[in-house]
Image (spheres, rainbow, N blue to C red):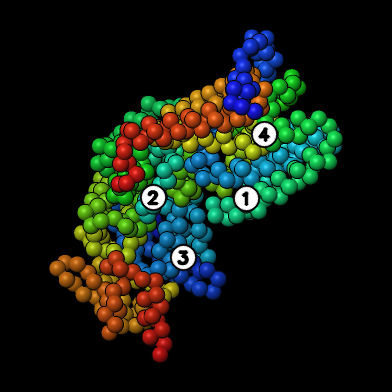
Amino acid sequence: MSSTPIVAFNNARLAYGRRVLWQDLNLQVAPGEFLAVLGPNGSGKTSFINTMLGTTALDAGQVSIDGQPVRRGSRAVGLIPQQRPFGDNVPLRARDLVALGVDGTKPGVRLARRAVAKKVDELLELVGASGYANRAISDLSGGEQQRLRAAQALAGDPRVLLCDEPLLSLDLHHQQAISQVIHQQAVRRGSAVVFVTHEINPILPYVDRVLYLAEGRFHIGTVDEVMQSHVLSELYGAPVEVLRVNGRIVVVAGAGGRELPADGHEHPQIADDVAHRDGK
Amino acid sequence: MDFSDLLQKAFNFQDYAQLLPLVSNSLVAGAALGIVGGLIGIFIMMRDMAFAVHGIAELSFAGAAFALLVGADVVTGSVIGSMVAALILGVLGTRARDRNSITGVLMPFGLGLGILFISLYEGRSANKFGLLTGQIVAVDDVQLTGMLGLCAVVVAALLLIWRPLTFASADPLVANARGVRTGGLSIVFMMVLALAVAATIQVVGALLVLALLITPAAAALRVSSNPVLTVVLSVIFAEVAIVGGILLALAGSLPISPYVTTISFAIYLACRAVEKLRSPRRHQV
């Protein structure tokens, strides 16, 4: 059954009031596939993730995971969120955060301590976080925390890993390391990865396809197909230039020479500026 | 009053053995409250709700004062008061910032109402101030049963929702994505908190509930990040404060609360010192 897509969007549409984020979305993500989701702020990237988590409902169409309609709390999906600091008053060590991924939704107190500890040890090993298993999460760096996030998300053996800007606010070294961990695990397990980011370069070696969302439109294809000046210009409805510099992709807005998402220096107003300039 | 008078008032161990049986009810109640405070305190800290607890306590005080005035059961009155406060906070203040401002609005109103009711009350004045600052011998058998019942409900409810509540408190975004009903849990937690506050007020008073519900947990969190150890320490600290406070108060003629709050605070200072000694630069990195 390896030909069955893990994620399938069928004529999907999402809108907030009159503002359509995307519509007529037909997309299938295959086992082992790495899909990058790019686009400016407010283009519906996080909402796209939320529709697969079942926390945001589509306005039209369907989305299914592993052949089943999306259900909130399904073990078939794992989420790696954006890094955010944990408070000082959260009494959890690295291993406890991962353990919450194993059985955190179950009622009561944890009784199967040994079994959970064993599973947690394996997960920590998998993402290379065994070295700080017993340290308080509030003492860990952003990069270390994101490795734990990966372990936490993998705890349920998900069919698809949903990553929502997991590299944001990490330094380059950690960006690469975390991307590699996520890719490796997906390949090893044959699960799919949906990776929302505005910085494509750290994940460039792993990306199979790109979904680029902008201005209520989208484009799907391989990196070479989507990251083209004419494709993005059409998407934004304004001149956009895609440059390749030393194997990196840099997207700049028309004559202004400002960068657009794909290069980590996203400013929400850029997409608007592009649209406005187009109107004049 | 000179210092030796004060000392005589605070610590006088004459007739101690004869006095002890008089407070056995208070000791049992205190021990139960220690467990409640130690357990729920960890969640209050994780959810950043210390100020909200204070707000709930003042409305609970108003409820108790009203019950006193009309001759109804004081525990029931304080339960109703804190439930109302918890519901208002739970529904209106889902975000920490909203919650703080709503608490700030609610707290003086509750305190004002309470003062109105106790001013109108014409019974024993010890009862009046007992609600605000705590009382020592007032726990009779009927009250004790009621309080133990409240404590049992709180502990049972906490144990039942322990894991998902930990997940939702530490990591709400992922917990929600994983299917934990974070909104529903937060309302349930507010209700449980309301019961805990109402029970605690009976012994340490509305103004000092934080000494039992916050300080022990805050102290435990300074010295450990192990989720099991912090809970154990928090309960031990709360027990030492409340049971130790009652035993010391017996030796003087002062209310119980200054003893409880002082022990609680001393434990907190000691834990901060331990934290500092262990890793002097932890918070600079």
Residue denoted by label 2: A85
Please report the residue visible at 48 percent of the width from the left and 29 percent of the height from the top: B267
Badge 3: chain ID: A
Badge 4: chain ID: B
For the residues marked 1 and 3, what is the alpha-carbon distance in whole angstroms? 43 Å
Disc assigned to residue B103: 1
Residue B259, above or below B179: above
Q: Is residue A176 left or right of residue A58?
A: left
Residue denoted by label 3: A12
Judged by depth in the image, the label closer to the viewer, 1 or 4, is 4
Residue denoted by label 4: B133
Badge 1: chain ID: B
Please report the residue visible at 54 percent of the width from the left and 37 percent of the height from the top: B214
For the residues marked 2 and 3, what is the alpha-carbon distance in whole angstroms? 34 Å
Say if labels 1 and 2 share a chain. no
Please report the residue visible at 57 percent of the width from the left and 34 percent of the height from the top: B211
Q: Nearer the viewer, residue B37 or A158?
A: B37
Give the SS element for disc 3: strand
Say if labels 1 and 4 share a chain. yes
Contact flag, marks 1 and 3 (Cβ < 8 Å): no
> Is there any visible trace of residue B32 in the rendered image?
no
Judged by depth in the image, the label closer to the viewer, 3 or 4, is 4
Q: What residue type is labelled 4?
A: Thr
Give the SS element for disc 2: loop
For the residues marked 3 and 4, what is the alpha-carbon distance in whole angstroms? 61 Å
Q: Which amino acid does label 2 sit on?
A: Pro
Residue A21, above or below B274: below
